[in-house]
Amino acid sequence: MKTKLFLLQLCRCGAIGMTLISFWGSSRLQAQTPGDWTWVSGGNTTNNPSVYGTRATPAASNMIGARYGQSGGAGSSPYFWIFGGTDGYGNSFNDFWTYVPSTGIWTWIKGNNTPNGAGIYGTRGVAAVGNTPGARYAQSGWTDQSGMIWIFGGYGYDADGNLGYLNDLWEFNPGSSAWTWVSGSSTANSSGVYGTQGTAAAGNAPGGRYYQSGWMDASGNFWIFGGNGLATSGGGYLNDLWKYNPSTGLWTWISGNSAASQPGSYGTQGIAAASNMPSGRYAQGGAADASGNFWVFGGRNTSGLMNDLWKYNPSTGLWTWVSGSSSANSAGVYGTQGVAASSNVPGARVVNIWTDASGNIWTFGGGGYDVSGTNGVMNDLWEYSPSAGQWTWVDGSNTVNSTGSYGTKGTATTSNQPPSRQVDAGWVDAAGNFWVMGGISNAGPTYNDLWEYSPVEVLALQGLTLQGILKGNENILTWQSINEINTAGFVVERSTDGISFSGIGNVTATGTGNNSYSFTDAHPPVQGNVFYRLKEEDRMGNVSWSSVVELTRTANSNISVFPNPAVSAVMLQINGGSLLNTPARLLDAGGRTISQQMITGQQQYFDLQGLAGGIYFLQLADGTTIKILKQ
């Protein structure tokens, strides 16, 4: 890869206007070589308590406490969320937190600042600010395409304060800060109601369970697989696959057994078959790829820890045993770090997995077996390529119970490494970076540290600038390359969820020197979020990606702000008189008012001198909020 530096400028255009401009990730170009870990937030010691501060008020002193079994993910705006978990001392939580990477600030949004709270369910299907799920851990969590956050099940406290397996489904609206009890029981230890396999019905419901794997498909349906909990009668390790359709509010039992602790049926590795089925298990990893397939890896069954990798194709309804052993407690085969090989395979373990935009499967750490067959807790990072059918040991130690290396907070280096851990929270942001928060060590202490991993080597950009320009129904992208060598061209990729990208056009590169390029998206989404990135290709077949830029179209075409990013001031442009003689407020990233002035003309000047660089918001009387990046 020879092209090293880029200046990427995105012009936001469209007849229906722009009211919010934002981007994920930092201004950097990513190349496909081994990446670095960055210790981003939290302590480099264990068992740190939470510092809650004031509810819904961002503050630099706020800090989420050490925990494991929490759920977490990326929100629809540039923030991450964490819900629940346990501290390992018998205390479980129902607190909901957000973290904004651009400010480095945690905010306690919802729930109790004391442990072991009972659930307040309210009326099923009705949102209320007083509602809250009971404290719990090992639940599933998702962010849907509308930015709503969902959790299912776990082990925790029901409406009566009783502790047990839960099967309740909840939705959280970040805008109203209200929970809705959507489905399932308000009492713990409910058995499953399976109905007819493949048929949705109002009476269907998975049994209470924890440490199940869960994911969301491209149509917005939620899926769960396995876990430790309750079947039709009795309990144990489950291998049932369920789908929940938010549009109908119905559960469907899709696959697997309605009885617990069932053995697997592997068939022939690599061959899908109707008789194939993973064994009942819990604490396995689960994820969906961009092609619509579901993946399950590892976990614990009645024989021990597993390292088998499975693929489920919803179109055919068939499972395929893809990789790993059909026997328990296998040691890892690491090979050479950074080199894929058909003999490589992670050791058996309990673990999380996630998928990248290219459909590769990634897993970090977990509790299991290292290269020598020693059982403990890991900090190794692995990638599986479905196209090549090979595992790569990417990073971390091949032996258990590594102490890791924190380095300097906020600084990525090749020597940084999270300490070994299991049942942490992990997710992927819109820029394709991996995040890990918390977890528990082999000896029992828990973490509250937040780590970022860039899956590819980060090369510097000269800068990144976003502009909001109204121009018909088009979005125009412009960028400039510096010191090109052997560059073949660029693929412009677009996404509506910031995760799954597809190419919408190609731009041929000059190949040498400093060059300017542009691309017009003539048919962007009419309304809502849209993400763009560039895939750069050289003549040797190497590729790299730019950082991701998120744009939001709203129904207001009469408002724009320029320049954005700004150095010392911005100009608000208003076409029409509806907002004349109304107030406009400039807010900081925490929502605090910095200044307010009346709009007296079609162009209104806002002075930013004296303000620190970062993210600010301009809020108008009609509810329009415009994000401003001050350099």
Image (cartoon, rainbow, N blue to C red):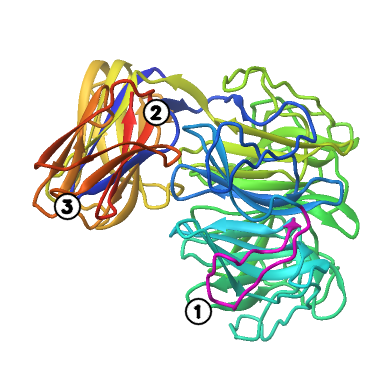
Q: Is residue 98 above or below residue 183?
A: above
Residue at image point 55% right, 30% down: 454
- SS majority, magenta: loop
Residue 365 visible, this orientation:
no
Q: Position of residue 84 (x, y in %)?
A: 69, 53
Question: Which dot marks residue 614?
Answer: 2
Amino acid type, residue under disc 3 in the picture: Ser
Q: Nearer the viewer, residue 517 or 486?
A: 517
Badge 1: residue crowd in 10 Å (few <14, some 14–19, many ≥20): few
The residue segment tinted magenta is 115-137
State which quarter of the image contains the N terminus: top left
Question: Which dot marks residue 248?
Answer: 1
The residue indicated by pointer 3 is 557
State which quarter of the image contains the C terminus: top left
Residue at image point 59% right, 66% down: 130
Badge 3: residue crowd in 10 Å (few <14, some 14–19, many ≥20): some
Amino acid type, residue under disc 2 in the picture: Gly
SS type, badge 1: loop
Ranked by sequence position, the earlier of labels 3 and 2 is 3
Residue 284 visible, this orientation:
yes
Ranked by sequence position, the earlier of labels 1 and 3 is 1
Residue 411 falls left or right of residue 419: left
Give the Cα distance between marks 1 and 2.
Answer: 42 Å
